[in-house]
Image (cartoon, rainbow, N blue to C red):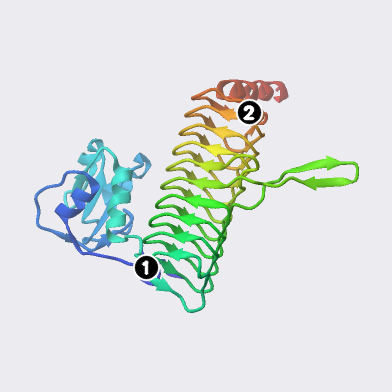
Amino acid sequence: MIEAPMGDARFFARTGPYALADIANAAVGTAPAINRMFAGVAPLQSAGRDEVSFLDNRRYVTALEQTMAGAVIVHPQMQARVPSSTIAIVTASTYEAWARVAALFHPVPAPRPGIHPSALVDREARVDASAEIGPYAVVEARAEIGPGCRIGSFVSIGAGVVAGRDCRIGAHASLSHALLGSRVYIYPGARIGQEGFSFATTKTGFLSIPQLGRVIVEDDVEVGANSTIDRGSTRDTVIGAGTRIDNLVQIGHNVRLGRCCVIVAQVGIAGSTILEDFVQVGGQAAMAGHLRIGQGSQIGAQAGVISDVPADSVLLGSPAQPRKEFFRQVATLRRMTRRPG
């Protein structure tokens, strides 16, 4: 199959064309005062004369030198490597600039206000007139859907759930016992607010413990596809503002994530653990319950965290340990297992 151009019109809306000055302004960068129009964005290897590209990784400097792009977003240190036929848009934050320029040409689609005829919206629910409720969605009693929200097909919004301004809820997601701030994006299939894994062990079996907390999702959070966030048992589960949660992540009851945390795919966080602001957790890492992970810490992929972590730590391995200790042990094991001769 022939590779389609970036931003296939079957799936992605496009605006433009835009003048070079407008693109440089969106990039928060500088460019020559040239009266030139551009129609879209594309990779260095395939961009044409009317398209904008970017370089963020020095490994692709050869592609930069050979590009046919009409304009390229580059760091000041790379400006000299831009071909003479290509206009340099110079900024110190190239990846951020690329995000802004790509969004200029391909903005998030605006909601189409209204409730689809197949949707079921309880008469006691409050849906703002500017919100979009998709096919077969269910909005239960006392739920509140704020201005500019987009509720996808087959979404279930439980009783009393609140979605603030400009939220997007992807297809087949379900929300209960949850309060969402503004500009929250819940990807398809995510489960927010279900009961946590909590029970008492008795002589005759297990006795479920009522889960009486909520899930609080603050502004500008994204929750990836098929991720799950349990509601609190005795207090709320909280996802801090600006946090990004990847696909297939499990967050237990009473967990609290600080601001701008990054949780990569298949991470599991057990109940009542606290991640302070700006913590980053690599894929498939796991954390035991009732821990505190200090601000700015980085937990490596597949790490197993079983004790509190000081701020600004970098941990690897299972059980997780400081990076230097981990690599020292790896080097020691290699020396011990190396056969003589």
Q: Residue at x 47, y 29 (%)?
A: 296
Q: Toward the viewer: 218 or 289?
A: 218
Q: Residue at x 57, y 33 (%)?
A: 274
x then y, percent, for residue 35:
9, 57
**In the image: residue 33, left or right of residue 158:** left
Label of residue 101 in the image: none
Q: Earlier in the sequence, mark 1 or mark 2?
A: 1
Helix, strand or loop status at disc 2: loop
x then y, percent, for residue 244:
47, 45
x then y, percent, for residue 191:
59, 55
* Dot 2 crowding, Cα within 10 Å, few <14, some 14–19, many 20+: many
* Dot 1 crowding, Cα within 10 Å, few <14, some 14–19, many 20+: some
How far apart are the two marked residues, 1 and 2, measured between alpha carbons? 50 Å
Q: Residue at x 74, y 45 (%)?
A: 209
Residue at the extreme front: 124
> What residue type is disc 2 on?
Ala
As displayed, is residue 306 above or below residue 219? above
Q: Quadrant of the C terminus?
A: top right
Q: Toward the viewer: 47 or 104?
A: 104
> What residue type is disc 1 on?
Ala
Disc 2 marks which residue?
A: 320
Q: Quadrant of residue 322?
A: top right
Q: Nearer the viewer, mark 1 or mark 2?
A: 1
x then y, percent, for residue 143:
51, 60
Q: Residue at x 48, y 79 (%)?
A: 117
Evaluate if marks 1 and 2 touch, with contact meaning CB atoms under 8 Å apart: no
As displayed, is residue 327 above or below residue 268? above
Q: Toward the viewer: 69 or 122?
A: 122
Helix, strand or loop status at disc 1: loop
Q: Toward the viewer: 238 or 103?
A: 238
Label of residue 129 in the image: 1
